[in-house]
Structure formats: structure tokens, C-alpha cells
């Protein structure tokens, strides 16, 4: 099911068991490309590490983590310490709070060089995160498809994430729905994703 509602319609994309709002393009094309360039050069991008079946994997996708404090965060058996906000990230955090009506204290950033890089089915429910806390997800650069899959019924919901757009996941979403960023041969350009979260 593709999202056909107008950009700013606050329509829950999920038919049940969670809440996902797609706000469409919040930043225009010029602002979005300025933000993309700043993040590309100023963020301390690192290759992501994961342990899958005990094997260390270094992903091509790059990641970074920023926050209010040097929070520690563990996923895929690796622990990271948050860097303190940059000026640019603080401005985007403020915008995120205005648009979504929620507050955040940290942000995980992903840099996908092209469509060959993506993220497999997962939920964001690490123990450090506020239970049922809102997760606000920005897209800058290449447009990519994003998908949700219900854990029991296997229903799927898809949405195109446009340049400069904001997606909000909240309520029971992480409990009942997986999400992913599928790889695609069609996309040849990079995308930067920011997910604002609350660590407790
Ligand atoms: O790149 C995206 O849009 C999603 C990233 C994501 O799901 C995550 O960082 O947990
Ligand atoms: Fe996620």
C-alpha cells in the first residue's frame, strides 16, 4: 500500500497496532540540500559494526550518534557513546520537536552511499530507549522506499521517503511492526537519515 495522501496530512499509515505519521517534505529542496551538505561534511561518520551469528561485520553504511549527554547505547553487541550536538543537529532537533509535538535527547544518523545499502527488517526497542517513545526520522538526499511489516499478520505498508521529509513512529509501533529500508538498484545517489529518539 503506497501513501497517496497529501504531504502534510496527519493520517496514521498503519491500519492497527501502532502510529506512523508521514509529514512529507518539511524542508524545501534548497534547505534540504544545504542540510545534506553540512551533515555530509560535519558529522563524524563511522562504518557501522555488527555481530551477526558471532561474526564481526563492517557495514558499508556509515553511522553516527549524537545527544544531550555522552549516552551509552548498545545494539548488535556493540556499545557506542554519543557525541554532543552540533549546531546544525540542534536546529533540526528543534524543528523536529515543533513539527512532531514530542521531545528527544539523542539522534542516530545513517549515511547510505547508494541504493545497494539499506537496512533489514528490525524494530527499535533497545533497553536504553524510552518505552513506546516517539522516533522521528528525517530523509535528506535520494528518495527511498520504506516499509513496515506486521509481526503476526505479515501485512505490509510502504511509504516513499522524500528529500527533506519527516516520518514519525510512536505508540505500539515497535512492539507490533518491523521496519526496513530495502536496497534498490535504481538509486545511485546518497541518502542521509536522522532518527531522533529518547534515551532514559
Ligand atoms: O534509514 C532509515 O530511514 C531508517 C533507519 C532506521 O530504521 C534506524 O536507524 O533504526
Ligand atoms: Fe529503525
Image: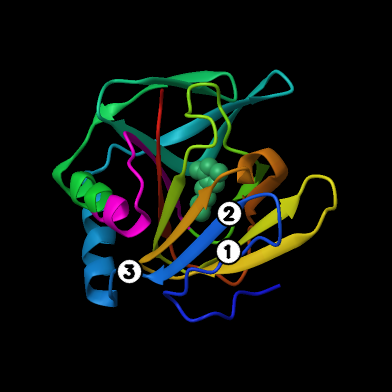
Percent x, y for residue 12?
A: 58, 64
Q: Residue at x 75, y 61 (%)?
A: 156
User: Does 66 sit left or right of 157 as displayed?
Assistant: left
Please tell me how crowded label 1 is: few (under 14), some (14-19), or many (20+) other residues with Cα within 10 Å.
some
Percent x, y for residue 14?
A: 65, 60
Query: Marks 1 and 3: which is nearer the front?
Result: 1
Q: Residue at x 71, y 43 (%)?
A: 176
Q: Report the Cα–Cα distance between label 1 and label 3.
A: 17 Å
Which mark, by number, is residue 19? 2
Which residues lie in the magenta part?
A: 95-113
- Is residue 35 at all visible to an observer of this figure? yes
Q: Dot 3 corresponds to which residue?
A: 26
User: Which type of secondary structure does the marked residue at label 2 adopt?
Assistant: strand
Which label's residue is closer to the chain start, 2 or 1?
1
Identify the image quadrant of the N terminus. bottom right
Q: Residue at x 53, y 28 (%)?
A: 49
Identify the image quadrant of the C terminus. top left
Which label's residue is closer to the chain start, 1 or 3?
1
| The magenta stretch spans residue 112 | yes
Q: Which image quadrant is residue 73 in?
A: top left
| The magenta stretch spans residue 94 | no
Please tell me how crowded label 2 is: few (under 14), some (14-19), or many (20+) other residues with Cα within 10 Å.
some
Question: Is residue 56 or residue 197 the one in the foreground?
Answer: 197
Query: Marks 2 and 3: which is nearer the front?
Result: 2
Amino acid at each position: 500500500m503506497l501513501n497517496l495522501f497529501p504531504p502534510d496530512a496527519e493520517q496514521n499509515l498503519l491500519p492497527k497496532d501502532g502510529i506512523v505519521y508521514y509529514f512529507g517534505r518539511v524542508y524545501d529542496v534548497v534547505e534540504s540540500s544545504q542540510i545534506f551538505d553540512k551533515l555530509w561534511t560535519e558529522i563524524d561518520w563511522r562504518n557501522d559494526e555488527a555481530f551477526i551469528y558471532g561474526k564481526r561485520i563492517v557495514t558499508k553504511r556509515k553511522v553516527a550518534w549524537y545527544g544531550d549527554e555522552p549516552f551509552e547505547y548498545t545494539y548488535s553487541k556493540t556499545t557506542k557513546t554519543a557525541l554532543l550536538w552540533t549546531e546544525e543537529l540542534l536546529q533540526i532537533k528543534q524543528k523536529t520537536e515543533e513539527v512532531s509535538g514530542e521531545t528527544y535527547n539523542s539522534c542516530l544518523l545513517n549515511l547510505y552511499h547508494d541504493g545497494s545499502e539499506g537496512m533489514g527488517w528490525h524494530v527499535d526497542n533497545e533497553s536504553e530507549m524510552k518505552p513506546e517513545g516517539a522516533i522521528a526520522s528525517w530523509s535528506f538526499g535520494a528518495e527511498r522506499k520504506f516499509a513496515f511489516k506486521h509481526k503476526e499478520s505479515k501485512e505490509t505498508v510502504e511509504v516513499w521517503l522524500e528529500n527533506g521529509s519527516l516520518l514519525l513512529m510512536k505508540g505500539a509501533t515497535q512492539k507490533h511492526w518491523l521496519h526496513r529500508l530495502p536496497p534498490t538498484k535504481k538509486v545511485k545517489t546518497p541518502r542521509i537519515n536522522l532518527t531522533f529518539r529518547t534515551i532514559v
